[in-house]
Amino acid sequence: MYPFGRGKYQVPSQKAVKKALTRKQLKNLYEASPKTNKQQIAKDYFFFLFNCSGLNVKDMASLKYENLHGEKLIYTREKTKRTSKTNLKPVVVFLNDYSKNFIEQYGNKEKKKTNLIFDIFTKEMSEEERYKKSHNFTRFLNQHLKLLAKANDLPEDISTYWARHSFATNSIRSGASLEQISQALNHHDLATTKGYFAGFEDDAMRALTDNLMNFD
C-alpha cells in the first residue's frame, strides 16, 4: 500500500524560522541597561553587525584596515573565498555613525592597512584556529546577549545571526526594495533574500485595506 498521494500522508514542509527583531524590540534592546561588562560587549557587537548589513562574526573578525575606504567597508565574504570562482563580488557596506564609533572604540589602535581591525584573530592563526576562535567568540556573544534579552522581555533565543535577519526585515519594512537588500546581503538570487524576511507587521498589512474605499 503506497502511503503517499491525494488524501493520504503528506510530508510536512519545513517551516522557516524567522529570526528578526521588530523595530520596537530593537529599540528595547538598544535602550536596555546591561548588568555586566560582558553583556555590554555583546550588545555593542550585535548592533555593529546589524548596522553593517548583517555582517557575520567570522567576516567581522577577518576585517583589516585595508577594507576601510572612507565611508565604506569593502570586503569579500570568507565563505566565498573558498570557492573556485575568480570574479568574486565584494560586499560594500556604507558606515554610519554607530559603526564608525564602534570601530574607534573596539578597533586596533594601530591602524596599519595590513592590521586586523579587531583583536579576535591573529595573523599567525591557521584556518582551523580561526574557525575555533570564531565559534567560541560567537558563543560568548550569544551567551551574554541571551541574558540581556531575558532581563528585558525579549526573545531568549536571540543570537548574533538575528542581526542579519533583523537588518533585512526592518530595511524592507522601512521601504527598501528586495533587490537592495539582496545586494547588501551579497545574495545571488532573490529567493534567498526572501527567506530572511519575516513579513510585514499587522499595522502595515491593515493599512493596505483601510483606504481601499477612499476614491478621492
Image (cartoon, rainbow, N blue to C red):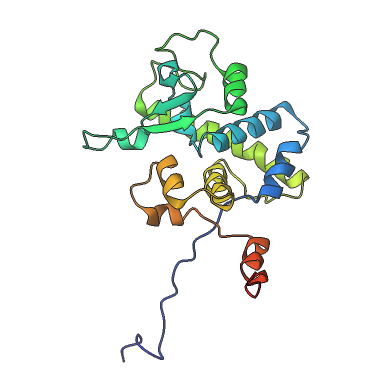
Residue lying furthest front in this view? 216
Image position, residue 78 (x, y; %) = 36, 33
Coordinates of residue 109 in the picture (x, y in percent): 55, 10
Pick the front one: 13 or 91: 91
Which quadrant holds residue 45? top right
In the image, 135 versus 88, the foreground residue is 88
Up-down relation of residue 11 to residue 101 (above or below): below
Q: How many marks?
A: 0
Q: Please, is residue 165 above or below residue 109 in the view? A: below
Location of residue 18 in the rendering, given as x and y in whole percent from the top left corner: 55, 57
What residue is shown at x 71% (from left), y 37% (from top)? 30
User: Is residue 76 shown above or below 198?
Assistant: above
Q: Is residue 4 left or right of residue 134?
A: left
Residue at the image point whose x is 46% and y is 32% from the top: 93
Decide: is 154 above or below 133: below
Residue positioned 49% across, 30% down in the render: 94
* Residue 1 image-quadrant placement: bottom left
Quarter of the view holding residue 151 = top right
- How far across and down, in percent of the image, does residue 128 sit? 37, 29
Front position in the image: 2 or 62: 62
Report the quarter where the C terminus lies. Answer: bottom right
